[in-house]
Image (cartoon, helix red, strand yellow):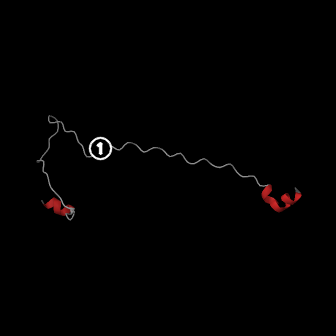
Amino acid sequence: MSIVFLLGGCQSLMMQSPATPPPVVNALPIPLASHEFSIDAFRDDVVGEIQVITAEYEDTLSDIARR
């Protein structure tokens, strides 16, 4: 038994500190739909008209704005 103690050296006397718990991660809030807007026809005024534009992969934002 003393051989095990001598071979272990100071390691047998050291106590391990308790493991710290992992940090609590808060859940992300549910994302809001930012692409839908409600407009009240009696209260809100909208200037212009609705346009549908077909864009392709090589179109830049400047190209789309010029149409």
Q: Quadrant of residue 6?
A: bottom right
Point out the residue furthest to the bottom here: 58
Percent across and percent down for residue 54 are 15, 56
Which percent across, then down, holds residue 32? 32, 43
Q: How many marks?
A: 1
The image quarter containing residue 57 is: bottom left
User: In screen coordinates, is 16 left or right of 50?
Assistant: right
| Quarter containing the C terminus | bottom left
Say which residue appears at 83% left-offset and 62% top-offset: 7
Give the labeled residue for mark 1. 33
Q: Secondary structure at mark 1?
A: loop
Which quadrant is home to the N terminus? bottom right
Q: Residue furthest top?
A: 42
Instruction: Give residue 19's position: percent from left, percent from top.
Output: 65, 49
Quadrant in the rendering for residue 2: bottom right
Residue in view at x 17 percent, y 39 percent = 44
Residue 45: x percent and y percent? 14, 41
Q: Given the image, on which type of amino acid does mark 1 rest?
A: Ala
Decide: is 57 above or below 47. below
User: Would you call the spot at circle 1 few (<14 residues within 10 Å), some (14-19), or many (20 or more)?
Assistant: few
Residue under the image location 18 percent in, 59 percent down: 55
